[in-house]
Amino acid sequence: MFGLRSNLRVGLDLGSHSIKLAVVEKVGPRFRLVKWKCSEIYTGGDAYDPEGPKKSVAVPQLMRVMGEIGIAPKKIKRLASCIGGAQVAAKEISSIMMTEAEMASSLLLEARKHIPLDGSETIIDYQILGDDPTESDKVRVLLVATTRKHYETHQDLLREIELKPGIIDIESLAVLNSYLIHSQMPEEGAAIFLQIGARKTNLSVIGRKDMFFTRDLPVAGQFFTDELRRKYGLDYQEAEQVKREQGMNPDIEKKGDTAEDALAVTEKSSMDKLGDEINRSLRFYVKDTGQTVFTHLVLTGGGVMLPGLDEYLSNKFNLPIELYNPFNQLDSRVPIEADNPYQMAPAIGLAIRGDL
């Protein structure tokens, strides 16, 4: 098995559709990719679980991936993984300077406004970003919160295969960590990041001088697959294949009458619904911050390979599109032949997290 030296860092993104894992090492000012793996969780005709993989499914698949990449879980000394979903929130706020205890108490009250209650304790972390440029007696604070139950469920899954949980980040920040290794934010205006996964699309807005904002949108890869299933009468595997190869307007025949036929006149397409969700979030951001200049859209995640999606978003928002390949940020000692490199952004951001 691959013995992990102390200077190697492992990033693990256990998604609802696939497992992404990256191993990097620091070489001078740059990071070098040592090993990586992306593997779908549902194989052999297994049905996708829209609620995310149960432990009975995720644990064996994670063990399989570790074996295929040649890593002994017990030998991993620096591991960073991520959590996400409705029970995770990140928000930038403005606060007067306080003692550490006062800040924690104040932010805990703020966090409870944003986290759905599940009967467990709310836990938080925060980072002071600097002085508030609009109010001299305040500072900018990035608040991250989740529930104790959600946090410990993630830890328990890792421990199931003898992984020490290590750093636990959130998906949106992991993507930004990856991007900001060697890329710069524009001097003026803000960039929009879309991490398009299976269950959700994470939208984040960031600029040099502007408030950080992030929100999960309910339209993502599985939403597109379900539209094809309804519209053309396909099973899950057929719809996935059609989506990847032909997009949302495939040249195929419908299998009999479908429920979509009755709704075809009035129902918006999945792409239009995604566009509406993005618009709604950006309007909220503009209202909250006054920033109206968006420089470009950065696309990451497994869903960005959907044919025609980048063109649709570029036309709808009249913005240039950057398909972000995180491998381009790294040197490499292994071949990189990835059909969809864009989905590796969180794992690579996590892998370098231990050095930040």
Image (cartoon, grey):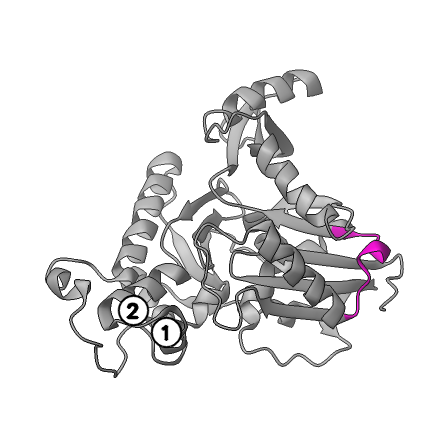
Q: Quadrant of residue 329?
A: bottom right
- Image coordinates of residue 261 in percent, x first then y, are 14, 66
Foreground residue among 247 and 149: 149
* Residue at x 59% of width, y 77% of height: 338
* Mark found first going from the N terminus, 1 or 2: 2
Name the residue that disc number 2 marks: 228
Identified by mark 2, the residue type is Leu
Q: Is residue 182 visible?
A: no
Instruction: Read off the magenta span.
Output: 70-79
Task: Identify the secondary structure beneath mark 2.
Answer: helix
Q: CA distance from mark 1 to mark 2?
A: 8 Å
* Residue at x 45% of width, y 59% of height: 198
* Disc number for residue 243: 1
Q: Are marks 1 and 2 in contact (CB under 8 Å)?
A: yes
Q: Say if the magenta span includes residue 244.
A: no
Dot 1: within a 10 Å radius of its alpha carbon, few (fewer than 14), some, or many (20 or more) residues? Answer: many
Q: Main secondary structure of the magenta part?
A: loop
Q: How many marks?
A: 2
Identified by mark 1, the residue type is Lys
Q: Is residue 69 visible?
A: yes
* Residue at x 36% of width, y 55% of height: 219
